[in-house]
Amino acid sequence: MEAALTISTTQKLAGIAGTALLIAALAGCGTAPEANPTSAPSGEAPTVVDGFLPCLISDAGGWNDKSFNESAKNGMDQAAEELGVEPLEFESANDNDYAPNMETAVSEGCTFIIAVGFKLAAATVAAATANPDLQFAIIDDYADGTQVDDAGDPIYDGAPDAPNIKPLVFNTAEAAYLGGYAAAAWSAESGVNKVGTFGGMQIPSVAVFMDGYQLGVEKYNEDKGASVQLFGWDMATQKGSFTGAFDANDTAKQTAQGVLDQGVDVLLPVGGPVYQSAAAAIADSGEETLMLGVDSDLAVADTSVTDITLVSIMKAIDVAVHDATIAAAAGDFDPAPYVGTLDNEGVKLSSFHDFESQLPDGLLDEIAALQESIIAGDITVESPNSP
């Protein structure tokens, strides 16, 4: 089949893998997606209802962000290839592109539209409300809060403000808990005993990483009698270091530098391309600081930072998009939310890659045991930003 047609606004058109943990996937409150994107049996084409046209609209940051936009596109492209259809993919350069891209998707005949990110919620609800016969999905948001109560305050009830929207959300705090524990162990072993984090926009899908990260650091301190400090985030007050956007720019680099100035030797940048600014700040510092990736396995997605990426906190956005698209194509669209967790393999910790041989003795076993405890319900990772 032909490659996906990408349209910009200006154009208007396995358990534990080795010792390194966990396989990626997505699952939900309703029927859980498969652990890996599924295809029809060999030689049998997937079912596609007449007129089915899947479409994808990015958040700012672009399709090559090595993070959530790119992961969503990978999932859509795989599903489209299996279905033998040509999707329309609309790249948003900034916030002003969301509504026009959504309007163009509808006018171009899209029947299933996936919006990548909470910032597209208003445009998604507006389009879904105006087009009840079309089907929509949104990543990292429930698409609620666009309606208000009598006092004019947003109504957040966990239900989309239109019945034809499917939320694809992730309880990333669980995987970030494991990442925070690993970061604390690394910093304690080095003798620095300081880790840090900063985010792009202060929104739930960003802060949930930071909450889990802090809880993981605290767990390490509790278990080991250690005193690893965290800079850049305070879960109790929900205050910390943010760039205000998801751009890799001077603001992001300065924000990263502000955390590095505290003397941390492990840094968690949360927010798509902002990791690039973190890497630049680390390079300028001349220190042997490591960082954690988010969403995708950053050491694999961007080999320019492999040598400073300790591990990544991942969520299976590609699987969510793939499986939702396949279901919609077969006429089986289900608006019930999917929530990715450790238990249903919607979130995970990546391999430590080349750093595995340098980890503190027993750390991998400790992380595996923590994961099992979270899945069993013996440990509850409580974040105010969890879906």
Image (spheres, helix red, strand yellow):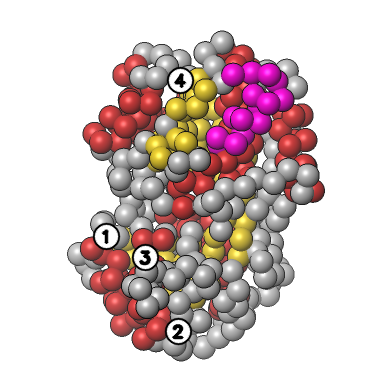
Give the crowd class for mark 4: few <14, some 14-19, many >=20 residues within 10 Å. many
Cα distance, mark 1 to mark 3?
8 Å
In the image, which disc is placed on residue 264? 4
Dot 3 amino acid type: Leu
Image: 383 above or below 84: above
Q: Is residue 252 in sight in this rendering?
A: yes
Q: Is residue 128 left or right of residue 331?
A: left
Q: Position of residue 241 (x, y in %)?
A: 37, 36
Nearer-N-terminus badge (1/3): 1
Reading the chain from its start, which is encountered first: label 3 or label 2? 3
Residue type at mark 4: give it.
Answer: Val
Please name the residue shown 23% across and 63% down the image: 96
**In the rendered view, would you say 130 is above or below 248?**
below
At label 1, the amino acid type is Asp
Distance from Cα at disc 4 to Cα at disc 2: 49 Å
The residue under label 2 is 134
- Residue topped by disc 3: 120
Q: Give the labeled residue for mark 1.
A: 95
Q: Is residue 200 left or right of residue 295?
A: left
User: Start and end of the magenta stretch?
Assistant: 213-227
Instruction: Give the label, 2 or 1, closer to the camera.
Output: 1
